[in-house]
Amino acid sequence: MRDRASYVLDQNDVRLVLTSGLRPDSEITRFACSHGDGVKDVALTVPNATEAYRQAVQRGARSVVEPHWVEDDFGRVELAAIATYGENIHTFVSRDDYAGPYLPGYTSTTENGAPATGIGLQNIDHVVGNVELGRMEHWVEFYERAFGMTELIHFSDEAISTEYSALMSKVMMDGEGKIKFPINEPAEGKRKSQIEEYLDFYGGPGVQHVALATDDIVGTVQELEERGLRFLKTPIAYYDDLEDRVGEIDVDYDDLRRLGILADRDEEGYLLQIFTKTAQDRPTLFFEIIERHGSRGFGEGNFKALFEAIEREQALRGNL
């Protein structure tokens, strides 16, 4: 395309589209200048994009792209899009009639004639949004009304806080439990919270992090570290009582300590998780690697350790 270039990266059910603007008047260039690198579109596979769009708009969602078909020799795909917080959108995608590599207009490419090997990433577990103070309830109600989603968990500022700052969060989930959208807003604290820092640097609401699920978090994190990805550091004292708190798990606690992986248990099971440092110079978007064993939670027992790790990064930037 004349104004942009897009590359599709996938591994199992994880699909990321990286887009760069090619002209100063490109929408992509303007977005990058306003926000830096970030998530613009959280796309959702649906049986019927026209019907998903019609129902969402009928329930109060704002239209961005009306339903339309795109096609090539591999078939056709139906697309439509609506607005959500900030400049983020949701594109509805119906691809039952398409056999190509991604969407019409894209061509398949492999390096040295063979696809790269994966590192255990399976799917996108959840996508977290940061919104302004006082706007969390608005977007909770939006996802309830427009998408028919329900509130899975509510975390108060008492649950997610440190000596200096706090946030509040509600997790929205679809009926099948596959799509999970936590929504964060800042809470009053002694100093600037990580959510306020994000809003300042991103220039408004947006996606804070994308959680990628793996079936072998130890192997995945080891591989990512070898490839240069940097993770938030966990104080060694965190592991002093971790085994007593979490109990029997399928991995060695020494591996968790060595790699800085967090663990938590609830009434449904346990989870293992770790968070990267921000993926770019602005302290905005980062990634989470998560392995679930029954638990549908988000590591409530780790919130304090995570928050303090992020605050250490904020302090280094002079933004706490």
Image (cartoon, helix red, strand yellow):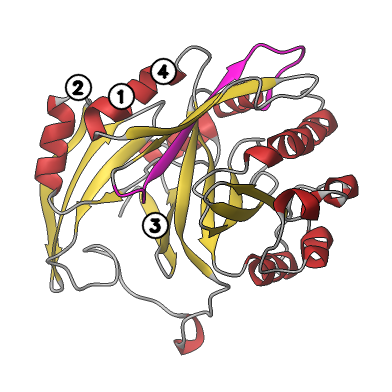
Residue beneath the point at 68% across and 40% down: 301
Q: CA distance from mark 4 to mark 1?
A: 8 Å
| Residue 113 horizontal/vertical position (percent) | 45, 88
Residue nearer the viewer, 1 or 72: 72
On residue 105, which mark appears?
none
Residue beneath the point at 24% across and 63% down: 105
Quadrant location of the N terminus in the rendered image? bottom left
Q: Earlier in the sequence, mark 4 or mark 1?
A: 4
Q: Earlier in the sequence, mark 2 or mark 3?
A: 3
Q: Could you tell me which secondary element the residue under label 2 belongs to?
A: loop
Residue beneath the point at 52% across and 56% down: 212
Q: Which-is-in-front pick, marks 2 and 3?
A: 2
Q: CA distance from mark 1 to mark 2?
A: 8 Å
Q: Looking at the image, can residue 275 be seen?
A: no
On residue 137, which mark appears?
4
| Residue 154 horizontal/vertical position (percent) | 50, 28
Q: Which residue is mark 3?
A: 6
Q: Which residue is mark 2?
A: 60
| Residue 136 horizontal/vertical position (percent) | 45, 20
